[in-house]
Image (spheres, grey):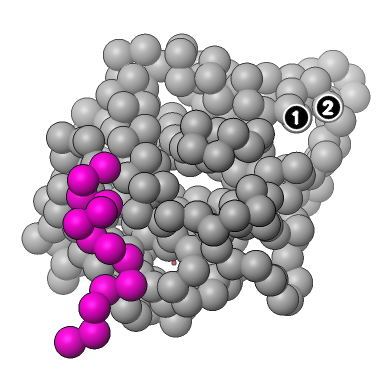
């Protein structure tokens, strides 16, 4: 059997969590790590399971977009949450916590300024370094699991194709090769801490998220179901929804959409 490209012992040594990533599934190739965790037949996985793939043949982005990523260069993985205590009133806080976890890891390890774009993109110098796809399933009216899929561009040095935001990687911005094992552990460590905080101190998670989002106060447009709305990014409310100030000064609450400055 071929040795894993990702050095699992190195990753394990840096992982400081209680449950996130403690059940770790490593694959060379899969259709999509999100699809795997969302499928009912794989429901035996425990809370906090992480699956990482070196290559996805059907990597999925938000709004049915395709997620492209060069094999073995980046970190494409999904985290499973089944403990309902994290689901709260809505899943927005999990969305914010996951992008914040990535941005903190990039700043702490490489001293790069990693900004956040609502609802959950991570940007460096206005270019997208990470995208997150959050999916959930429910039984009856109750959410029974949430899958957070993270696509983080780490060591890829060239991007081809059409993107709605120009892409970049940490290697391009830091001008050095990045150790994926340490970065992955750091993201998961931060994520578990922020998940707990989203219950005990949700205001703090929101405050930290907002401090990294430079769009607040800017004129933006939001496209949702082919409809575009214009206004000023007024704030994020206590539930993590975007508040858009319209021309008539009315505030509209936005749930999910594509935001551009
Ligand atoms: C986006 O910005 O549109 C979200 C991209 C999310 C990509 C990740 S890669 C790991 C996980 N598996 C998928 O199929 N998608 C997510």
Q: Name the residue under label 1.
A: 215
The Cα atoms of the two marked residues, 1 and 2, are separated by 5 Å
Question: Could you tell me if the residues under marks 1 and 2 are in contact, i.e. CB atoms within 8 Å?
Answer: yes
57 on left or right of 169: left
Residue at (90, 24) in percent of width and height: 247
Residue at (67, 28) in percent of width and height: 213
The x and y percentages for residue 231 are 84, 30
Of residue 166 and residue 2, the one placed in the foreground of this image is 2
Q: Quadrant of the N terminus?
A: bottom left
Q: Name the residue under label 2.
A: 218
The x and y percentages for residue 167 are 70, 59
Of residue 105 and residue 146, the one placed in the foreground of this image is 105
- Judge whether residue 51 can be spotted in this image: yes
Report the magenta residues as a range. 1-14
Q: Does 235 appear above or below 231? A: above
Residue at (83, 27) in percent of width and height: 218
Q: Is residue 2 magenta?
A: yes
80 on left or right of 243: left
């Amino acid at each position: 059997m071929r040795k894993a490209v990702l050095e699992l012992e190195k990753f394990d040594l840096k992982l400081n969590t209680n449950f996130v990533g403690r059940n770790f599934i490593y694959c060379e190739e899969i259709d999509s790590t999100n699809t795997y965790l969302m499928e009912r037949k794989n429901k035996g996985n425990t809370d906090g399971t992480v699956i990482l793939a070196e290559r996805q043949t059907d990597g999925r982005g938000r709004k049915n977009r395709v997620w492209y990523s060069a094999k073995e260069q980046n970190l494409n993985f999904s985290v499973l949450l089944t403990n309902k205590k994290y689901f709260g009133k809505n899943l927005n806080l999990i969305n914010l916590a996951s992008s914040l976890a990535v941005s903190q890891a990039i700043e702490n390890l490489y001293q790069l300024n990693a900004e956040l774009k609502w609802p959950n993109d991570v940007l460096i110098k206005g270019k997208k370094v990470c995208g997150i796809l959050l999916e959930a399933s429910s039984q009856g009216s109750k959410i029974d699991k949430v899958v957070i899929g993270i696509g983080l561009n780490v060591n890829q040095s060239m991007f081809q194709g059409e993107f709605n935001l120009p892409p970049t990687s940490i290697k391009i911005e830091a001008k050095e090769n990045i150790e994926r094992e340490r970065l992955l552990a750091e993201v998961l460590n931060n994520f578990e801490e922020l998940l707990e905080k989203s219950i005990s101190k949700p205001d703090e998670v929101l405050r930290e998220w907002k401090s990294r989002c430079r769009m607040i106060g800017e004129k933006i447009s939001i496209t949702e179901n082919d409809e575009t709305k214009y206004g000023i990014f007024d704030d994020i409310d206590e539930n993590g929804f975007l508040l858009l100030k319209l021309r008539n000064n009315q505030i509209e609450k936005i749930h999910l959409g594509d935001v551009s400055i």
